[in-house]
Image (cartoon, helix red, strand yellow):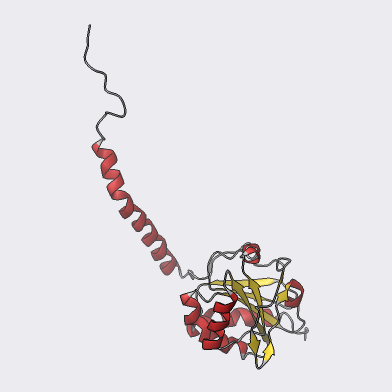
Amino acid sequence: MNDAPVETDAEAPARPGGRRFLVALPAILFAALAGLFLYQLESGSDPHKLPSALVGRPVPDFALPALEGATRDGRAVPGFAAADLRTPGKVTVVNVWASWCIPCRQEHPVLSLIEKDPRVRLVGLNYKDQPENARRFLAALGNPYSAIGADEKGRVGIDWGVYGVPETFVVDETGTITHKFVGPLSETSLKEVLRPEIDKAAARSKPAS
């Protein structure tokens, strides 16, 4: 009879192949991400232009209160709701921002360029922010928004498919979302990506010749 002790799974030595796989796992993941990024560059796809299930559909039903204490030109800035994004003859640009978002500071000067376009109404969705912090942000950098909705809990952002800030949506006069831009806007992306999308949305509101 063989009385040799039986080796259990817990006592079994780790297999060298398993250890090598765990060590190599971070490198494998990095290589996969790098490959995806390289593919995007070579294919000409814009990493900021991510697919959204809402593009081509009406804005979700929502109503946001005003950011308390927010002003522009000495007047209180209102909140906004889904019905406010159906504006005949106007394209609405909805910018999702927060005071704690560093890239939001980077893109803020670009929003002033958007706001100067007479075809556009720029509104801000203040996402998961504290009102006092949001007001300080605007006091320091300026307020380009004609309306600001306070989404302190982030629930409306979920309905919009927001998973990070900043994000920017183009909405035509019928209240249909025509474009979603993820990440901070720059003068280049405004010129090459967002402005053409605004042009397309504005063209839909022109009467047929």
Residue 59 visible:
yes
Residue furthest out toward the bottom: 73
The answer to whether 73 is drawn above or below residue 170 in the figure is: below
Residue at 26% from the left image edge and 44% from the top image edge: 20
Which quadrant of the view contains residue 4? top left
The answer to whether 52 is drawn above or below residue 186 in the figure is: above
| Residue in the foreground of this view, choosing between 43 and 68 | 68
Check the picture and name the quadrant holding the N terminus.
top left
**Image x and y of residue 108, in percent:** 52, 83
In the image: residue 38, left or right of residue 104:
left
The answer to whether 62 is drawn above or below residue 66 in the figure is: above
**Image x and y of residue 107, in percent:** 50, 81
Residue 191 visible:
no
The answer to whether 109 is drawn above or below residue 98 in the figure is: below
In the image: residue 149, left or right of residue 12:
right
Q: Please state the total of marks drawn on the protein image.
A: 0
In the image: residue 146, left or right of residue 28:
right
Residue furthest out toward the top: 1
| Residue in the foreground of this view, choosing between 109 and 44 | 109
| Residue in the foreground of this view, choosing between 137 and 14 | 137
Check the picture and name the quadrant holding the C terminus.
bottom right
Residue at 54% from the left image edge and 66% from the top image edge: 50
**Image x and y of residue 98, in percent:** 55, 74
Residue at 73% from the left image edge and 73% from the top image edge: 81
**Image x and y of residue 134, in percent:** 57, 78
